[in-house]
Amino acid sequence: MKTVHDFRVKNIDGEEVDLDQYKDKVLLIVNTASKCGFTPQLEDMAELYREFREEGLEILAFPSNDFAGQEPLEGEEIKAFCVTKYEAEYPIFEKVHVKGEEAHELFQYLSDKKENGKVGARPRWNFTKYLVDKNGKVVDSFLPLTKPTARRVKRKIQALLKD
């Protein structure tokens, strides 16, 4: 069965990235937007990353303009916004579609239980979160309302980091 590690994506600078470089890391993959009511979660993501990166957590941010045009920025503007305003140190990737027929293949995989074997949760809005274990398998998803720093998210991350 396919895993997240089988995908290639482009980072915010347009460089190809093999997600297999994240083998043995726990991943929280999030579709983000700069003009959303949930945008302050970028700060929560930065806090979570600082707390757990030394233990093996990586947060992968994928900006998307799929919901109400809430990501009007492009490339360097997105990067500057996330880094300057929210002190993002986690990897930020190229803006992608996360829903519909144009959805990036990674998000098709993340949201389709037939493909990933565990989670069937399509992004319904910005800041949908997917939790991936060290082997690249999708193990859970969280709705946009769930903050990245929520106790239940942290508990699941900690459990996966110990495995």
Image: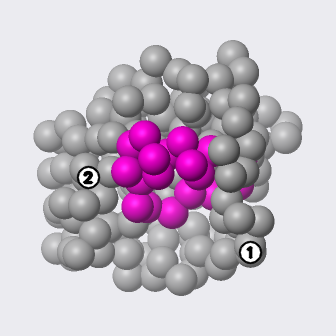
Q: Give the quarter of the image for residue 120.
A: top right
Vertical placement of residue 12 versus 21, above or below: above
Q: Amino acid at mark 2?
A: Leu
Q: What residue sits 68% from the left and 52% below the top?
A: 76
Helix, strand or loop under label 1: strand
Picture coordinates of residue 147, whole percent (x, y): 30, 33
Residue position marked by numbered label 2 in the rendering = 48
For residue 141: magenta?
A: no
**How many numbered marks, from 0 up?**
2
Seen at 69% across and 16% down, the residue is 68
What is the crowding at mark 1: few (fewer than 14 residues within 10 Å), some, or many (at least 20)?
few
**Observer-nearest of 15 and 27:** 15
Q: Position of residue 3 (x, y in %)?
A: 57, 70
User: Which quadrant does the N terminus fall into?
Assistant: bottom right
Residue range (magenta): 78-95
The residue carrying mark 1 is: 16
Q: Residues within 10 Å of mark 2 (few under 14, many from 20)?
A: many
Q: Indicate which disc residue 133 carries.
A: none
Name the element at disc 2: helix
Q: Inspect the magenta stretch and tell me whether residue 81 lies in it.
A: yes
Q: How is the image coloured?
A: one colour
Q: Residue 26 in the image: x percent, y percent?
A: 35, 68
Q: Residue at x 34, y 47 (%)?
A: 45
Q: Amino acid at mark 1?
A: Glu
Q: Residue 35: which quarter of the image?
A: top right
Q: Residue 85 placed where, x, y %?
A: 43, 40
Foreground pick, 130 / 57: 57
- Rounded to the nearest whole Å, what is the CA distance between mark 2 and mark 1? 25 Å
